[in-house]
Image (cartoon, rainbow, N blue to C red):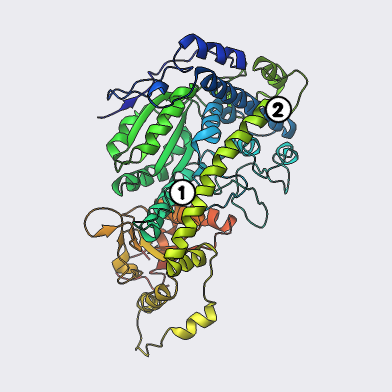
Amino acid sequence: LKRITLFTRRRIDKMKFSMLAIAGAALSSGVLGFTGPTLSTGRSFAARNVLKMSTAVETDVKASLATAANEARGLAMDSIAAAHSGHMGLPLGAAEVGATLYGGQLKYNAADPQWMNRDRFILSAGHGSMFIYSWLNLAGYDLPMEEVKNFRQHHSMTPGHPEFPNSEHNTPGIECTTGPLGQGVANAVGFAVSEKMAEARYNTDEHTIFDHTIFALAGDGCFQEGVSAESAAFAAHEKLDNLVILYDANEVTLDKMAEYTQSEDILARYSAYGWEVYDIDGHDLDAVDAAISAAKSSKNGKPKFIKCNTIIGKGMEETEGTNAAHGEAGIPYVDKAKKSIGIPEGEKWYVSDGTRDFFKGVAKKNEATYDAWQSEYASWTSANPALAKELVDSIEDNVMPIDEMMKTIPATNAPAEATRVSGNNAIQEVAKLVPNYISGSADLHGSCRNYINDGGNFGTGFDKTYAGKNLYFGIREHSMGSILNGIAYHGIFRASGSTFAVFVDYFRPTIRVAALAELGRVSYILTHDSIGVGEDGPTHQ
């Protein structure tokens, strides 16, 4: 078992972060502000080996991140208190993870939230939605503070669980609808599939236009749900090393402490699947930054799993570290908690000028990355006009109207035949007309007949490549539905998947979420739906 360990599990002492405290700690270390943790493999994450900057600059960055983390905690507390509803545990407990992501590790441009080569961040633990709303506001997305204040109000941009832009909500920076636990983890696998496919289809020897990373933040509930296990096995088997799962390991579920219902070694489980695993202190900014940096740079064919050991509801001593911190039980203690973490007394939804200035600096760096990519994309477009048109048509979902499409599909004039046979003939013609159409099946390509001839198979090993149009999900219907949704959310390909109609019960939740999200890029091919039960009997028809 190869395990990269940055943290030995222990009950973390309660800490109060402030700019002075973190700056003092940085100065006392004498090594560019902080000494990086060392991996068991012998590699060091020490900042001295990576960054060439003065101690003062490094101290300022760490102090700014720590301050931003506490102010994000304050925003979450104020919004949940105002709504008298919500989940404080994750936004308070994972604040350092958010600061690290939005303060430097994520590749994004808040001014262009649909940039095709942005990193994707998915909050699988969607109940902690004030986490992402706080960070989107701080990072400069078009999510005004008034909308942060309207948390959980009807028709606001900040619904109780994150929702993919649709006719009811349009919140920039939200990549997919999450809420049913585990779905976001599985959706993230779909995003990673789509990104790998885009790399294979559109990158050339001369130009790289797709090279982004997929991140998801999830909790114990996500990993107890079986869909995440199905998807983790698939991701490792197809070597999706562009995927990073961050586990908010706070040892708490809603009813009880997590130990009441689980006792597994989750790192051993994910390592057995074929993931590269990390074990860190989720409140240590250096450890979080180092682990994410390592995960992004390690292109070894393994998806990455980072266990961030955290204290749920951190900063609110009356509830932190207990299952009471999960929801809104801490509302009576909000004012005291805010004061204890350095929020000026009496201030609500407080963001300091220093934090705003810090994120302006982050935006400037992000814009430089974005501008360089735009130049690369322009050169690629000039060199590959047909490919560029195909990509634009795919992203903009420019598809031939159905009535015109039907006219191009020749009549077969065949005698009576199974509808799945007729459907297969139609699918071959549709695939020619829609280059971004891809198909998959839960081990039933042969029976459901939705295989795209000459489309190639997706994945690694055997006859598979990442450019392939046919996905083999194995016997994982629930995971198939979630991965299809993730591909659709990613916004390039039109995905379909097949199984027998009765087995839709295995992935009904994903169809429901796709409908809520108004996902027009995903479809389901359900066969063996006759009212006449065949030889397999009622379990299969």
**Label 1 Cα crowd, 10 Å radius (few <14 / some 14-19 / many 20+):** many
Q: Is residue 129 above or below residue 350?
A: below
The answer to whether residue 308 is visible is no
Mark number displayed over residue 187: 1
Who's the residue at 61% across and 43% down the image?
161
Real-space Cα separation, disc 2 to disc 1, in angstroms: 36 Å
Residue 235 pos. (x, y %): 35, 46
Who's the residue at 40% across and 53% down the image?
208
Identity of the residue furthest to the bottom in this view? 413
Badge 1 marks a residue whose secondary structure is: helix
Identity of the residue furthest to the left in this view? 462
Badge 2 marks a residue whose secondary structure is: helix
Residue 42 in which image quadrant: top left
The answer to whether residue 205 is visible is yes
Going by the image, does 99 lie left or right of 345? Answer: left
Tell which of 529 and 103 is nearer to you: 103
Residue receiving disc 2 = 353
Who's the residue at 54% across and 13% down the image?
14
| Mark 1: amino acid | Asn
- The reply to whether callout 2 and callout 1 are in contact (CB within 8 Å) is no
The quadrant the N terminus occupies is: top left
Who's the residue at 40% across and 18% down the image?
9
Q: Nearer the viewer, mark 2 or mark 1?
A: 2
Residue 487 pos. (x, y %): 45, 55
The quadrant the C terminus occupies is: bottom left
Going by the image, does 334 lie left or right of 103? Answer: right
Residue 443 in which image quadrant: bottom left
| Mark 2: amino acid | Asp
Residue 304 pos. (x, y %): 37, 37
